[in-house]
Amino acid sequence: MGGKPVYHLNLTEEEIKGAKYAFLPGDPARVPLIAKAFDLNSKELVFKREYRTWLGQMEGTSVLVTSTGIGGGSTSIAVEELAMIGVKVFLRVGTTGAIQDKIKTGDIVITTGSVRLDGASVHYAPIEYPAVSDHNIASTLVRAAEEEGVRYWVGITASSATFYPGEEREDSYSGYVINRLKGSLEEWRRLRVLNYEMESSTLFVACSALGLRAGCVTGVIGERSQSEEVDSSKLLRVIEPTIRVAVRAMKLLIREDLLSTNLD
Ligand code: URA
């Protein structure tokens, strides 16, 4: 790539100082929170459109935090352009709406695989191709959640292209959900899907297809069996333990990679 910045993220290979690891929150406002959670001296590199990137150091290694914006299209751009400048490991740190009664606000969900309800992942691989986490990242997230004492659930996530109709919400402008999607929430619940979010399926399919490693941890901010409300006043309380788990998992992964040849 040389010194030329990648188009949307506006970052160069030189600027990221050899970073091979990136946290991927959706929200640009969450980028400094994550970066400062592992390195108080971390710094912003660039903020363009929905893509905000900070650089810090963890275990003697450069680590990025880059926001993806919402949804598969913008996530695919973040993954592509970070990979072009050398990033190999991607850890999504997001928020989610639970669809199983047992999962409560403040819990976290570690996604092992995603239902491909997005529109972007079919541009990487046909729909029969699975959207799965790197298994080692998923199990490292489990270990991190145990060590941090955060209540967690492990399993399948429905990853939707849209927040309103795709997650069968009636709290939308029209209140109408097309026939094809009516009853879909209940069907996913019956099929033991844990939660809804909007980026993991694109992330997993793109990374598997491109030979990159990806994982996903999300904090529960809505309980869809109770209501359609997403309580933004609880956001910080939910995102704090999610970030703690993600940061601990990243440290464990880096330590493990330093002892092996995983990134060769
Ligand atoms: N993100 C989603 O996609 N859905 C929710 O309910 C909460 C966060």
Image: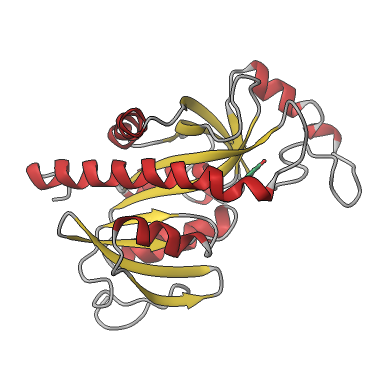
Q: Is residue 85 left or right of residue 49?
A: left
- Residue 100 vs 46, above or below: the answer is above
Q: Is residue 215 left or right of residue 249?
A: right
Residue 94 locus on image (x, y percent)? 51, 47
Residue 79 in which image quadrant: bottom left
Q: In this view, does 20 lie to the left or right of 105?
A: left
- Residue 152 vs 190, above or below: the answer is below
Residue 260 locus on image (x, y percent)? 9, 42
- 222 or 21, nearer to the observer: 222
Residue 181 in which image quadrant: top right
- 217 or 210, nearer to the observer: 217
Residue 24 in which image quadrant: bottom left
Q: Which residue is drawn at 15% across and 41% down?
A: 256
Q: In this view, does 156 lie to the left or right of 168?
A: left
The quadrant in which the N terminus is found is bottom left
Residue 122 seen in render: no
- Residue 156 vs 82, above or below: the answer is above
